[in-house]
Amino acid sequence: MEALLTEGYDWIRALHVISVIAWMAGMLYLPRLYVYHADAAAGGEASEMLKVMERRLLRVIINPAMLAAFLFGILLLLTPGVVDWSAGWIYAKLALVFGMAGFHGHLSRWRKDFAADRNERPATFYRKVNEVPTVLMIGIVILVVVKPF
């Protein structure tokens, strides 16, 4: 297993980066759809179109990309010599990744609210939370690239 991980390291890393990019694209776009949906009349044409877009974005892009990012990320963590487990940055990075996954869960729950015409949050709420994945992503990238501690 170790030899397979070491020999496949570049491919695993590439697939991890691709998965993270796809996950982040969806995580940045879905809250923006919620901004528009919060202003749309429940049951109206725009609302129904947004329901379809939100469901497809979550099921076809965001969910599979997150699963792939976790799979390839775990393989990277298991690759000998990739992570210095005595360094603090990896634990901070993992905490932020789990924060991103938690936000993903909130996005999924909010989509169910919109799908059932139960959303009670204003568009301004979604405008504000739209910044969460960006802030988490900045922290994750800095920790991985700079490894400040």
Image (tube, rainbow, N blue to C red):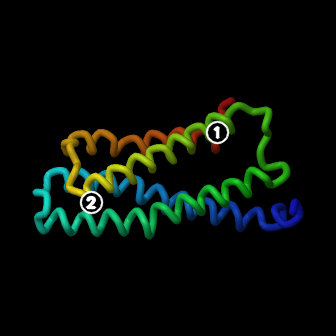
Whole-percent x and y of residue 44?
11, 64
Q: Quadrant of residue 67?
A: bottom right
Q: What residue is pinned by disc 2?
A: 115
Q: Give the residue type at disc 2.
A: Ala
Q: Is residue 131 above or below residue 49?
A: above
Whole-percent x and y of residue 41?
10, 57
Q: Is residue 33 visible?
A: yes
Left or right of 131? Residue 114 is left
Position of the N terminus by quadrant: bottom right
Left or right of 2? Residue 111 is left
Left or right of 68? Residue 30 is left
Q: Is residue 137 visible?
A: no
Q: Secondary structure at mark 2?
A: helix
Q: Give the residue type at disc 1.
A: Val
Foreground of the two, 93 or 147:
93
Foreground of the two, 68 or 134:
68
Q: Secondary structure at mark 1?
A: helix
Q: Residue at x 74, y 50 (%)?
A: 77
Q: Residue furthest right?
A: 3
Instruction: Report crowding for label 2: few under 14, some 14 to 19, many 20 or more residues within 10 A (C-alpha).
Output: some
Q: What residue is pinned by disc 1?
A: 146
Q: Quadrant of residue 89?
A: top right
Look at discs 1 and 2 and give the one toward the viewer: 2
Q: Residue at x 66, y 59 (%)?
A: 71
